[in-house]
Amino acid sequence: MPPSNTPISSVQSLARALDLLEAFPRLGPEIGLSRIAAELGLSKATAYRLLSTLEERGYVERSPGSRDYRLGLRAFELGSYYHSQLEVRQMALPLMREMTAQTGEATFLCVREGDQAVCVERVDASAQMMVFALRVGGQQPLHCGAAPRALLAGLSDAEVRDYAERTGLPAFTEHTITHIDQLLEDVRCTRREGFVFSQDDMTRGIAAVGAPVYDHTGSVIASLSLSGLSNHYDTERVAVLGSLVARAGGRLSRQFGYRAPLPQP
């Protein structure tokens, strides 16, 4: 393993800051400096420096009218984001199992994390797919694969251009989309048809169809996809599976309060 360039003191400070945040559920909604220092075995000066940094970043805040600290908005945002992912997974899983049972293909649920799509749930169709498919917790660039590209449907054209310029659209195979205009047309087609088809663009021999999942605000919060071996995906099967995954994405979107008209593939 190569030597780390991160000073030990920085790692220790990070660990102490996490210990401090984790103390709030245990010690109460509001905690004073002296108690925090005592509970964590820190000097008051060290505890104060940690709290000041966390306060600057919005993870803790001072309670009005007292000198105690409580969790800040940023901490609640992270918790809310985790809860939303958990809710999506819980609501999507029965539908994913149904799709895999109906098609014999693996089903994936992805969410966006910056410029990456992260797989948060999957239902396997066979042991063979374990070799090729994206694992839970695995990431792919947003321009590669059906589930990641379906997530791009929630971005404006300007945001898609920004993504392309920021990342450079690196190629992983000769089938990867590497030009901005091609990516924009792909995203517009996804919005219009309700699903996107990918083949051999991230991994040779793997094809997939994916569809976006919208919430009540019209934001894309996740994507569903079906994936299998490329030689099984002829034009007719792509149309059938594309229609199925688009309807599934629509059903899940309705559960999250999306009321606008959905594409009819």
Image (spheres, helix red, strand yellow):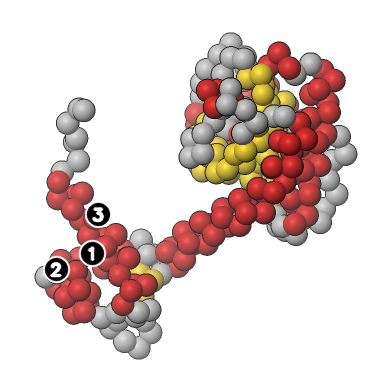
Q: Is residue 264 left or right of residue 54?
A: right
Q: Are marks 3 and 2 in contact (CB under 8 Å)?
A: no
Q: Residue at x 78, y 38 (%)?
A: 246
Q: Are marks 2 and 1 in contact (CB under 8 Å)?
A: yes
Q: Which mark is residue 42?
A: 2
Decide: few, some or many residues near mark 2? Use Cα within 10 Å; few <14, some 14-19, many ≥20.
Answer: some
Q: Residue at x 81, y 56 (%)?
A: 259
* Residue type for callout 2: Leu
**Residue at mark 3:** 14
Q: Quadrant of residue 20?
A: bottom left
Q: Are marks 1 and 3 in contact (CB under 8 Å)?
A: no
Q: What distance separates the C-alpha of mark 3 from that of mark 2?
A: 14 Å
Looking at the rendered structure, the secondary structure element under dot 2 is loop
Q: Earlier in the sequence, mark 1 or mark 3?
A: 3
Decide: few, some or many residues near mark 3? Use Cα within 10 Å; few <14, some 14-19, many ≥20.
Answer: few
Q: Earlier in the sequence, mark 3 or mark 2?
A: 3
Q: Residue at x 52, y 17 (%)?
A: 172
182 and 143: which is toward the camera: 143
Q: Is residue 177 visible?
A: yes
**Residue at mark 1:** 50
Q: Residue at x 38, y 65 (%)?
A: 58
Q: Earlier in the sequence, mark 2 or mark 1?
A: 2
Residue 185 at what x, y percent from top left? 73, 26
Decide: few, some or many residues near mark 1? Use Cα within 10 Å; few <14, some 14-19, many ≥20.
Answer: some
Q: Quadrant of residue 232?
A: top right
Looking at the rendered structure, the secondary structure element under dot 3 is helix
Residue 148 at what x, y percent from top left? 61, 34
Residue 167 at what x, y percent from top left? 50, 29
